[in-house]
Image (tube, rainbow, N blue to C red):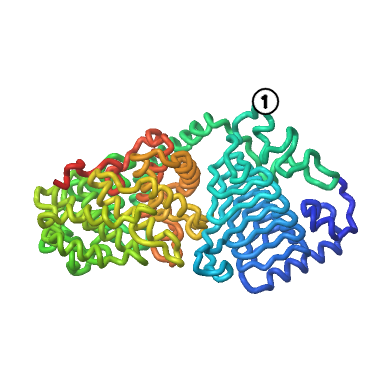
Amino acid sequence: MNQQESDDDGLFDHCPWLYAEQASQRQRAAQDQRRKRLLGRAGSVRLGEGCFVAETAAVYPDVLHLGDRSYIAAHAYVTGDIRTGADCTINPFTVVRGTVTLGDAVRIGAHSSLLAFNHGTSPELPVHQQPVTSRGITVGDDVWIGSHVVVVDGVTIGDHCVVGAGAVVTKDLPAWTVAAGNPARRIRDRREPRGAAQSAEVPGGAAPGATASGSETAGPRSRPAAEPLTGPQRSAPHPAQEPSALAGDLSAFAAAARAQAADLLDRCRQPGTGRYADRPGAEPTVRAHCDAVEIAGLLLGEAPPDQPAAEHAARLRALQDPVTGLVPEYGAPPPVPGPAGLPEDGASAYHVLCVGYALDLLGSSFAHPVHTVRTTTADRLVRHLADLPWRDRAWHAGSWVDSWSTAAHWNLRLGTEAAAPGALEALFGWLHTHADPWTGMWGSPTPESGRLQTVNGYYRLTRGSFAQFGLPVPYAERVIDTVLDHTRDPRHFAPGRENACNVLDVIHPLWLCARQTTHRAEEARSWAANQLTAALRRWHPGRGFPFGPTPDGTGPGREPGLQGTEMWLAIVWLLADLVGLADVLGYRPRGIHRPEPALPAGGTA
């Protein structure tokens, strides 16, 4: 490469990879001014080390976060919420608009368009008056998007993909896919050795020897089209090798977690009280004690070692209010039942789950039935189900169903009625007749959070009802479509935004529906494998897993604790089981997140 300085100011706009080595002091000063103007605009702009933004590029974002050594070349058009990792390239005449998230080392060829928004098409209104919607586009790490490619709103392109020139990407592409065509379709797995028929393998159906950029040879000022992407590179393993490597990582993780489990629990124990806090410095809670029991059962195969199992059970049993059958928080008065037996929300509703399953793991049970549910009639239950806030607070509604169903389950386990005659059957009848056949779920998306409430509410609802009682869920294929669509929402699944609740509430529905159908199984397994690799990196030696960030700042957050550890251990198992590697872990959830039904399918009779 020619290392001499260039006097041609347009050179770097069109070939920004040459800027670092060939720009003059005058040209560097001009680029510094360009960066300062961008940083001074309204909106959030962050530019990493070594970034370049062409003077001729139209860059008018609400949010622009460029990772280190990333560039925007000549005449690119960039608006909206754009976030990139390191070593990303937006080449000349490329359009990137809407909410677009790029991983590390993403190359976007010239004249391509990533359009993360859409117009409605209702016949009642002219197009220019239709509402604009945006689900966002997410692109993983190490992705090459060829020239003249169009990626439409809502698409996720997995890690290590190659998209051939001229393709129109309308659906998700799993990791390692080589795709081409209109609409884009899978040509092969990038890790597979190339066959003899070159024309079947070249993205875009180009002639033998052509590249995704559309040219056969690189010009004197072009980076060779077949040159590896910038940044650290690893050779791609053959598909048969990847499960073996992941299995090794899982085995090492499980061994480390078991070795550190006793210390992890001890750091959260409150000496002299028999109680646990989620993390050092936090107040002790009933849930934290239950999380400790679940973690010890998973990793140690026994009760937390600070006291015998019988003493743990006695402490938890003593918390139950004998009149209502509910369990208040430490120091709180007995809970006030709601119109259908349970409080609308709060700790006591979740204690039905966590205390009940902790006692079950300890070889014990509640001392009393949950009387407030045992006396709920079918009419009262159906009225309350109809009054739950399904439209805008589907998680709240689903969590109430989870707690009510679980209380009915514990009542049956104690040998009493689940509820008044016909109430449990009325629950499942109502759920079947009110599931949306388009999404398979209950509730509606919201502008603020998309499908988050609906999907998270679905997990809680089906965990306590269909999964716990061993019944098939309705519209399993539509559920998978809805959940996979939700995973493309960068508000919840962009790098650094995942938390235990959101990942659990995706993997459990995918895992549960995979018991009934193979619909989009490869995509679900690809998502699970990627999440599994990321999840293992979240472990903090001796401290466990953090729950993860939440948009409103509530919850345990990024500090490792018992809640995050209990949830992520279950998530890791579900992810591993979906990709066929759960046996490597040497543990299996037996509490709240147990994979087997808590009652046989006939338990509702």
> In the displayed structure, does residue 57 sit left or right of residue 327?
right
Image location (x, y in percent) of residue 529: 48, 41
> In the displayed structure, does residue 18 sit left or right of residue 508?
right
Image location (x, y in percent) of residue 411: 14, 52
Which residue is painted at 23% across and 49% down in the image? 357
Which residue is painted at 62% across and 71% down in the image? 43
Image location (x, y in percent) of residue 20: 79, 54
Q: Nearer the viewer, residue 415 or 537?
A: 415
Amino acid carrying mark 1 in the image:
Ala
Which residue is painted at 85% across and 62% down in the image? 25
- In this rendering, is residue 254 above or below 483? above
Q: Quadrant of the N terminus?
A: top right
Q: Nearer the viewer, residue 127 or 200?
A: 127
Residue 446 in view (yes/no): yes
Q: Which residue is mark 1?
A: 196
Residue 50 in view (yes/no): no
Which residue is painted at 61% across and 41% down in the image? 179
> In the displayed structure, does residue 57 sit left or right of residue 404?
right
In the displayed orientation, state which residue is furthest to the top: 196
Image location (x, y in percent) of residue 473: 30, 47
The kind of secondary structure element at disc 1 is loop
Local crowd size for mark 1, using a 10 Å CA cut-off: few (<14), some (14–19), many (≥20): few
Quarter of the figure with residue 351: bottom left
